[in-house]
Image (cartoon, grey):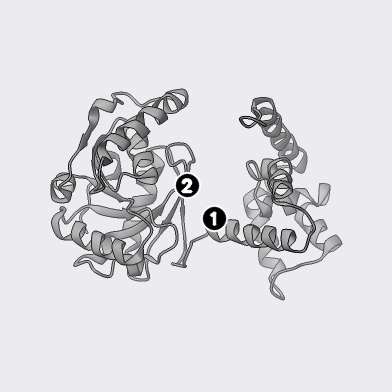
Amino acid sequence: MNTIKPQDVRRVACVGAGTIGSGWAAYFLSRGMEVTATDPAPNAETRLRSNIDEAWPKLERLGLSPGASQDQLRFTGDIERAVADADFIQESAPDNEALKIELIGQIDAVCRSDVVIASSSSKFLPSRVASGCKFPERVIVGHPFVPAYLVPLVEVVGSATTPMEILDWAVEFYRLVGKRPLKLKKEIEAYIANRLQHAIYLEALSLVEQGICDYADIDDAVTWGPGLRWAVQGPVLHRHLGGGKGGVRHMIDHFGWNGASGGEGDFIDAVERRWGHVSIAELESWRDDNLLTMLEGLTPPPRQ
């Protein structure tokens, strides 16, 4: 597939202008791009522009790209007009698989043949959402996190038949616009972060059902404990720092291994490939500096 270079993308179509779609539209506008949005819902344009107005001061705090302006936004109720001259398409319709299959099939039928189509789906397999397309190989999942105009992570997912060049194109495009793309090795429902979030949510429900705590305790336990740390280090790096000067090797020697039998060697190798060139003391100092920055900037929730 002969696609435009990621750095040459200037016109983005946002199909769906709800919470996710308007977040994407605001973000792409802040990166200096021309955005055409479409959504069949009543008053969709009014809500879209209102959502962008609300997001814009926050995007200004992050820093706008040269040429960034809300004047670069167009809205149309005609999906064909919305995608006709797009260099990239971000679909953000409601998370209904049948709807997405039909909608992405419509987009595929009328947009340029060299354009990558990314779905904001939070859980569906890309092979499924692309199943109504003539050119399914150019359809991927580009899953953002709310608010899409602030949270950097985008999970990039393809099917078994998605060319690697398409996935690499999407990763590079999202990287160039300032996101933190994460490419999955193969498709799975709900991808990575949502599966991790859901596991914690199920455990939270179980703790409350057992009478261990109430729902407010769950939020406080995460917000004032591991949630702060997770903003800096994930659970893998945490195991490395938890081992003190001995790092991940000491952690596993002392507390044991909870994964599949024999997998600890691969785990240790992966950690040391990524972090072995940095001392534990340096990592702890970096963690603490970031925690201090967050703690100094935290404000209490409204009306608490």
Q: Position of residue 79 (x, y in %)?
A: 17, 50
Secondary structure category for the residue under label 1: helix
Q: Which one is nearer the viewer's eye here, 188 or 121?
A: 121
Inspect the image, locate mark 1, and give the three-letter code of the amino acid beneath it: Ala
Q: Residue at x 34, y 69 (%)?
A: 127
Q: Residue at x 46, y 66 (%)?
A: 189
> Mark number for residue 193?
1
Work out whether 292 lies above or below 103: above
In the image, taking residue 56 as reference, residue 261 lies left or right, namely right
Q: Which one is nearer the viewer's eye here, 166 or 179?
A: 179
Residue denoted by label 2? 145
Q: Quadrant of residue 232?
A: top right
In the image, taking residue 75 as reference, residue 271 lies left or right, namely right
In the image, taking residue 256 as reference, residue 167 lies left or right, namely left
Q: Position of residue 20 (x, y in %)?
A: 39, 45
Inspect the image, locate mark 2, and give the three-letter code of the amino acid beneath it: Phe
Q: Quadrant of residue 174?
A: top left
Circle 2/circle 1 CB separation < 8 Å? yes
Mark 2: few/some/many CA within 10 Å (<14, 14-19, 20+): some
Q: Which one is nearer the viewer's eye here, 208 or 292?
A: 208
Q: Which one is nearer the viewer's eye here, 143 or 272?
A: 143
Q: Position of residue 164 (x, y in %)?
A: 35, 61
Q: Residue at x 28, y 24 (%)?
A: 67
Q: Residue furthest bottom?
A: 261
Sequence order check: which comes first, mark 2 or mark 1? 2
Q: Position of residue 1 (x, y in %)?
A: 22, 59
Mark 1: few/some/many CA within 10 Å (<14, 14-19, 20+): some
Work out whether 60 lies above or below 166: above
Q: Residue furthest right?
A: 254
Work out whether 122 lies above or below 173: below
